[in-house]
Image (cartoon, rainbow, N blue to C red):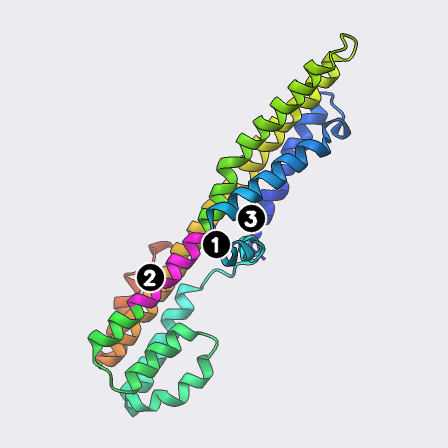
C-alpha cells in the first residue's frame, strides 16, 4: 500500500470533517443524495465521453494503482544489473540466458536481456526498449488524464447541482424555509470542489509522479542492458548507473 497516499486521503477527510465540527455544524446536515447523483453521474459520463470504453473500464484499476503502487527500488535494480554484468563478464553474455527465467516477472528487463543474448545490435536493442518505455509512459498518462478530467469537471457539476437546487427553491419559495433550502443547494458546490481538490487532482498528480519513477527504472534497466551488451566492466556499469539516481538514494559508503 502506498502509505503517503493513504495518509493524505484520510487526513483530507479528517480536515474537512474537523472543519465542519469546529464550526458547530452537523456532518449529517451536509448529506445531499441529489447532489451526489448529479456530480457522481455527471463526472463519470464526461470521462466516458472523453475516452474510449476500454480506457474507461480501466478507471477502477487506475484508482487502485494510486493506493497500492509499489515504488521501484532503484538501488536494487542497479545491484541486479551489476550482478548480471559480472555474470556476463565472467561466463559470457550467453550465460545470461539461464537468468532470464528468474526475472520473468520483469518483462521489460527480460526482453532486453533476451535480445542481448540473441546477439542483436545495440542500436536495435536500444530502439526497441525506448519504444517500450514510450508505450508504457503513454498508457500511464491516459490514467492520469482521466483522473485529471474528473478533477476539472467535478466543480462544474457541483455548480450545476447548486443551480438546480436554487431553481427548485425559487419555484417553491417559502420564506420560512429559504435558509435551509439555500444551504442544501450550496452543498453541491461543496461536493464538487472538495472531491476535485482533495481526491481527483491529487490522484492525477500522484500518477504522474509514479510514471516518472517507472520511466526512471526502465531507463536504468535499458542502460544496464546496453552496458552488458557492450562488455563494460561491472564497476564502470555501477558508476554509470549511480549517476542516474538522486544523490539522497546513494548510500554513504557508495559516495565514499
* Above/below status of 239 relative to 87: above
Label 1 SS: loop
Find the magenta span and give its range.
130-143
Q: Is residue 140 magenta?
A: yes
The chief SS type of the magenta part is helix
Q: Is residue 99 magenta?
A: no
Q: Quadrant of residue 45?
A: top right
Residue 246 in percent (x, y) is at 34, 55
Give the tally of numbered discs. 3
- Farthest residue in the front direction? 171
Residue 254 in percent (x, y) is at 33, 65
> Disc 2 versus disc 1: distance between alpha carbons?
20 Å
Q: Earlier in the sequence, mark 1 or mark 3?
A: 3
Label 3 SS: helix
**Can residue 252 be seen here?**
no
**Can residue 180 be seen here?**
yes
Q: Earlier in the sequence, mark 3 or mark 2?
A: 3
Which quadrant: the C terminus? bottom left
Q: Is 220 left, or right, of 40 in this rendering?
A: left
Residue at 38 percent across and 64 percent down: it is 217
Foreground of the two, 64 or 5: 64
Q: Earlier in the sequence, mark 2 or mark 1?
A: 1
The mark found on residue 52 in the picture is: 1
Amino acid at each position: 500500500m502506498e502509505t503517503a497516499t493513504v495518509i493524505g486521503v484520510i487526513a483530507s477527510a479528517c480536515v474537512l470533517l474537523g472543519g465542519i465540527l469546529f464550526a458547530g455544524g452537523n456532518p449529517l446536515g451536509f448529506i445531499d443524495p441529489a447532489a451526489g447523483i448529479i456530480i457522481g453521474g455527471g463526472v463519470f459520463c464526461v470521462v466516458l465521453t472523453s475516452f474510449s470504453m476500454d480506457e474507461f473500464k480501466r478507471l477502477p484499476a487506475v484508482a487502485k494503482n494510486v493506493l497500492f503502487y509499489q515504488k521501484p527500488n532503484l538501488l536494487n535494480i542497479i545491484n541486479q544489473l551489476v550482478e548480471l554484468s559480472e555474470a556476463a563478464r565472467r561466463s559470457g553474455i550467453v550465460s545470461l540466458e539461464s537468468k532470464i527465467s528468474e526475472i520473468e516477472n520483469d518483462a521489460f528487463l527480460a526482453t532486453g536481456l533476451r535480445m542481448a543474448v540473441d546477439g542483436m545490435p545495440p542500436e536495435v536493442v536500444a530502439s526497441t526498449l525506448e519504444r517500450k518505455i514510450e508505450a508504457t509512459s503513454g498508457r500511464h498518462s491516459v490514467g492520469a488524464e482521466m483522473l485529471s478530467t474528473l478533477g476539472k469537471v467535478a466543480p462544474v457539476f457541483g455548480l450545476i447541482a447548486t443551480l438546480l437546487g436554487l431553481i427548485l427553491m425559487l419555484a417553491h419559495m417559502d420564506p420560512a424555509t429559504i435558509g435551509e433550502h439555500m444551504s442544501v443547494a450550496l452543498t453541491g458546490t461543496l461536493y464538487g470542489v472538495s472531491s476535485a481538490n482533495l481526491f481527483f487532482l491529487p490522484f492525477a498528480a500522484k500518477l504522474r509522479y509514479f510514471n516518472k519513477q517507472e520511466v526512471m527504472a526502465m531507463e536504468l534497466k535499458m542502460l544496464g542492458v546496453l552496458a552488458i551488451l557492450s562488455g563494460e566492466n561491472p564497476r564502470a556499469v555501477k558508476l554509470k548507473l549511480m549517476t542516474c539516481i538522486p544523490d539522497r538514494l546513494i548510500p554513504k559508503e557508495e559516495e565514499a
